[in-house]
Amino acid sequence: MHPALLLLAASFLTAPARAAAPMPFSPAVEERLDLLLADMLGPGRAHAFVRLVDRSPDGPDPVPPDPAPQPAALWDRISARLEQAPPVLPGFPAPRSLREEVVRELVRQGAAVDKREAAQQGLSVMLIVDQAVGDPELAAASEAVTRALDLAPRRGDTLQTARAPMAKTRRDPAVSAGAAAGGTVGLALLTGLVLVAMALRGRRTALVVSDSRSAPAFDVHRPIPPAPPQLPFLPTADPDLAPLTPEAAALAAELLRDGPAAVAAWLLGKATPAEAAQVYARLPGPIRQGAARLLVDAGEPYPEPVRFPADLKDKLERRVTGILRLEEIVLRLGEPFRTEATATLRFCSPKAAARLGALPFFLDLAAADPADLRLCLSAFSTDALAAALSPEAPELRRAFLDAVPAVAADLVRERLPAEPAGGKEGQGAVLARWNRLQRAGRVRALPSVLQ
């Protein structure tokens, strides 16, 4: 089994410590939902994960259940009922619901809850759709899933939605590792990365659909109506990541060691620049290079045909933000990563390669105008400046210290470590800030860059 699927099974809908572990539904249930979603949105553009979760915060400790039919026989019976059930279309009530039967059979099969708490069993559904799916389509798909499973907030049911790169990509041998992100592997890996980042931060990932509860910013809050008419059409946001710790960045890079590069590019764009640099530095070379190509739009997948002008505008915005993010990453990581990215893009995106090649080095900042350098360094503490200057010669340190107030310069000298520590990381942060200020027109270009 792919490690992303194992991660998804372990971290889906992280619950409080006393809650029972979520139990997966039969694959037939999710397959039936996928058929419904394929009819509405098209093949391969959506997938639903369904889990049964104990919502009781104070339930008793799990107790072994009575002997029950084997799981295979249980799912065969439920699958047979599903095959006989007619399709459920948006806007029409379900002819009948299998909810009570499914919950009853699952509780009998192995739900570790007290009988008095059985009524608090809830269904947790995660609906993931392609990035090209619009808000009205997503709302209709959410409503169809709601009616198909007879979801209701009063029973503790939850529904969460997210977007992920699922559409088929253009065939480009140079970015085949990233362009193969469509399908279940990329989808499950993307979901796992989001969930593990939140789990390592100790935050819940379940999106509660009841208006009386708060929901994290995994995606838009979509209340489930108890009855027709329809779901409210709320603006949809892309999934937001919780802050990535170094442990989470290392785990994300480990999961992405075999690709796909498109998921790596998505994560690099969603994380903060510092977090993205941590992940990028740990990625294997081929995945790193594929993600760099995708960030600068050298073969990144977009809906075909382009729905002008909305998709074209989105394409141009992503092209701009992608190269800016890649600049931030290579500035923070130093010369080896910058050289690798420049060589990777030299043929597929010469303009992007030229931009990376024109980025300044830390030594170049010594020739900057003192007022501009003071503005750049003003955002850093004296400890951070001491760490950044620790690997450099006294002559270079003097050029930086002359640009800051005398009191700050004295503090930096006092705090210079005996042995260089964290210098490259600190220098990368200074370079990244200088680059942002220069793009905003707040500092002048360096003499070495103008030549």
Image (cartoon, grey):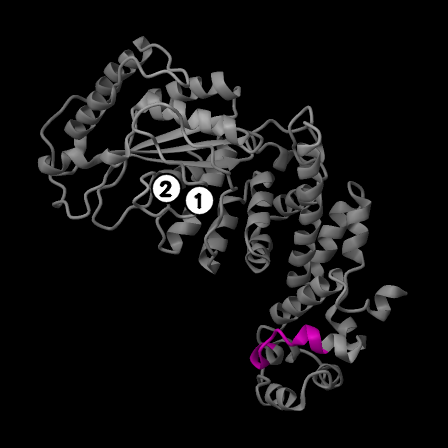
Relative to 412, is 119 above or below? above
* Crowdedness near tag 1: few (<14), some (14–19) or many (≥20) residues, C-alpha within 10 Å: many
**Residue at (52, 49) in percent of width and height:** 253
Which is nearer the eye, 418 or 107? 107
Q: Quadrant of the C terminus?
A: bottom right
Amino acid residing under circle 2: Leu
> x, y (%) of residue 428?
65, 66
Tell me the number on the disc at residue 218.
Answer: 1
Which is nearer the eye, 191 or 141? 141
Query: Which secondary structure is most common in the magenta stretch?
Result: helix
Determine the secondary structure under disc 2.
loop
Left of 341 or right of it: where is 14? left
Q: Quadrant of the N terminus?
A: top left
Q: Are marks 1 and 2 in contact (CB under 8 Å)?
A: yes
Q: Is residue 378 magenta?
A: yes
**Marks 1 and 2, how far apart in space?**
7 Å
Which region is colored magenta?
374-384
Pointer 2: what residue?
Answer: 207
Left of 283 or right of it: where is 82? left
